[in-house]
Image: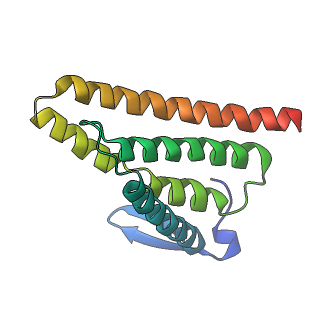
Amino acid sequence: MERDRSAAGQGRTATIGVFALQVDRQELAAIFAGGFIGALGRAALAQGLAVHTGEWPWATFAVNLLAALLLGYFITRLQERLPPYTYRRAFLGTGICGALSTFSTMMLELLKMIDAGDWGLAGGYAAASVAGGFAAIFLATKLVRRARIGG
């Protein structure tokens, strides 16, 4: 855990069956606020990038790569350069990047491609999305670490 939430008096414990769930209201608020911003950003980018060139879903692909790039930047920066006792990670990583990326839409687009018999396109889209996401995170991480060494 990043911090002892109960010591700050912010945690609430709820029991669900045999599981005890520790709820931090400030962390949930940070995720909610970030999610709101990320969802608005995704909607705006998806509309702005609604380019129909062939069957490739460019808007979803671009938004997911952007979210991976931002996630790599935010998480590396937060873990390595800033104090961990804040709600920035929940706001930026889980909230904004989680809502900005759209895994479910990607899965629906893959299903449509497969239903249409476009197995090659579906395989290429899946591979490019995963490889592009990893590359974006890798690039962002390297940029943050390079800035730390240089600055």
Q: How is the image coloured?
A: rainbow
Q: Is residue 86 left or right of residue 46?
A: right
* Residue 98 in the image, given as x and y percentages of width and height: 47, 54
* Residue 7 in the image, given as x and y percentages of width and height: 69, 70
Find residue 140 and report its image quarter.
top right
In the displayed structure, would residue 146 be above or below residue 49? above
Give the residue furthest to the right: 151
Give the camera-side residue of 53 and 21: 53
* Residue 135 in the image, given as x and y percentages of width and height: 54, 29
Q: Is residue 22 left or right of residue 3?
A: left
Position of the C terminus by quadrant: top right
In the displayed structure, would residue 44 be above or below residue 26? above
Q: Residue at x 29, y 49 (%)?
A: 105
* Residue 3 in the image, given as x and y percentages of width and height: 68, 59
Q: Residue at x 70, y 62 (%)?
A: 86
Q: Residue at x 44, y 63 (%)?
A: 39
Find residue 30 and report its image quarter.
bottom right
Give the camera-side residue of 142 and 124: 124
Give the camera-side residue of 86 and 33: 33
Q: Is residue 18 left or right of residue 69?
A: left
Give the residue furthest to the top: 120
Q: Residue at x 53, y 59 (%)?
A: 96
Total labels drawn: 0
In the displayed structure, would residue 95 be above or below residue 70? below
